[in-house]
Amino acid sequence: MERRNFIGGLTLAAFSSALGARIVYGKLMPAGYLPVGLQDPDPYTMFGKDSGMVVLNDRPWNMEARAHLLDDKVTPNKYMFIRNNGLLPEGIDPAAWTLEVSGESALRPGRYTLEELKKRFPAYTYQLTLECAGNGRSEFDPPASGNQWTIGAVSCAYWTGARLKDVLKEIGVKDNAVYIGYHGADIHLSRDPAKEPISRGIPMHKALQDETLLAYAMNGQDIPLAHGHPLRLVAGGWPASASGKWLRTISIRDRVHDGEKMGGSSYRVPCEPVAPGTEVPDENMCIIESMPVKSLLTYPRTGAVIKNGQRLEIRGHAWAGEKEVSRVDYSIDFGASWKRCSLGQPVNRLAWQHFSAQVEFPGQGYYEVWARAADSDGLAQPMVLPGWNPKGYLNNACHRIAIKVS
Ligand SMILES: Nc1nc2c(c(=O)[nH]1)N[C@H]1C(S)=C(S)[C@@H](COP(=O)(O)O)O[C@H]1N2
Ligand SMILES: [Mo]
């Protein structure tokens, strides 16, 4: 799918078959020329995404949903955000794919084919919330560099696979193990094979949780290419960057994993709040672990118009990292007063929860509906932008939609 795959040695016939049509003036096409029809493949078709999804970047591919597209209780592929740090792996062959489990704290380093992972270990299925730590970055001031995610870099699909803890048990973990790190098959933007786009990880206690999976299926089917085909680490409730796609190696480490994007300001925030724009020394930066409480109004779509006297059903999802959501409230008066939403239970730990309410408006005019969730410790979402940090992570401010009563 990368441009370089196509050029070099490809015949006119190969181009024609890739284009699905004969190149009528092919003889006149300059040597080494890549037909425009094969350039910049359409990401919607390539990844099976809905046309309402928003492309933030094409090299690497980054795509987000709109709030109203996330209305399903289980996120289908077509509405799932894509966050890539590098180029897609090339020539994936699931039949030949192996996972290596090694590292200085592995007792009996080993290797598994996908078939072995499926046969040797019981399969578990969980619905798991994956949110990019940078979701909401676009609101930060001063602005933070990186993809300008609005609210659409979150998903909650079903993932099926072996438990990482079952595999780690067979491999054997030395007493000095503190972390696992992942290595994927994706390609660094520079195409330098010595460099990795990203190689993050999780501490042992998270690695050993029941819900932490070596997943080979998503929503009951093979994992789609963009989301880590054919194997992916899934650590729900934590920054989605901990869930390594196109998984090739799990490394059991005797130290905090020091792979690409584990240090500096990558996926780290000031351990204590700082004034916007502050330069924070490295030793005062902490790795993001469990994600903060957050909610999203997925119905109606912002800008909806209703008739005077009509009741409006609002609904959405709420999640709280490792914790549960204990309540969701809504306000139609800019946060002056709040009413309770009805809130469902998660289908399993680390899955988002659904909320809804019937809203009555006092008369014609412009309103905003704000939603605010609180976690099981009583910690609520901030109404406006929370603590500034250099890379614009963890914006869990209340989601707001506009409603007109006509
Ligand atoms: N190998 C690999 N794994 C990766 C990434 C990547 O670029 N390469 N991106 C990470 C980040 S930052 C996020 S937010 C999630 C995005 O998962 P998704 O694209 O399936 O939604 O994958 C994570 N795992
Ligand atoms: Mo991310």
Image (tube, rainbow, N blue to C red):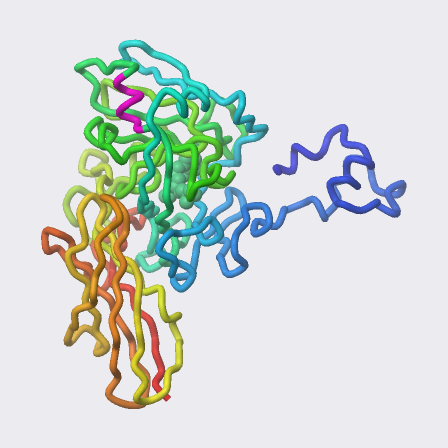
Ligand 2 shown in quarter? top left
Say left or right for 5 vs 379: right
The magenta stretch spans residue 167: yes
For the residue pair 363 and 145, the one nearer the viewer reads as 363
Most common secondary structure along the magenta stretch: helix
Q: Looking at the image, can residue 279 be seen? A: no
Asked if residue 273 lies left or right of residue 69, the reply is left
Quadrant housing the C terminus: bottom left
Give how far across and how far down residue 171 sits, in percent: 30, 14
Q: Quadrant of the N terminus?
A: top right
Q: Position of residue 35 (x, y in %)?
A: 75, 44
Say if residue 221 shows up in the picture: yes
Question: Looking at the rendering, which quadrant does residue 379 occupy?
Answer: bottom left
Q: Nearer the viewer, residue 129 or 334?
A: 129
Q: Looking at this rendering, what residue extends furthest in the top direction? A: 108
- Residue at screen point 46% across, 22% down: 115
> Image point 65% across, 38% down: which residue?
3
On screen, 247 above or below 302? above
List x then y, in percent, for residue 316: 31, 62
Report the residue at 27% width, 36% height from top: 211
Number of residue marks: 0
Segment tinted magenta in the rendering: 163-169
Indicate whether 315 appears above or below 164.
below
Residue 220: x and y in percent read: 43, 41
Examine the structure image and report whether residue 331 is included in the region drawn in magenta: no
The reply, left or right, for residue 378 in relation to residue 201 is: left
For image coordinates 25% across by 60% down, the residue present is 397
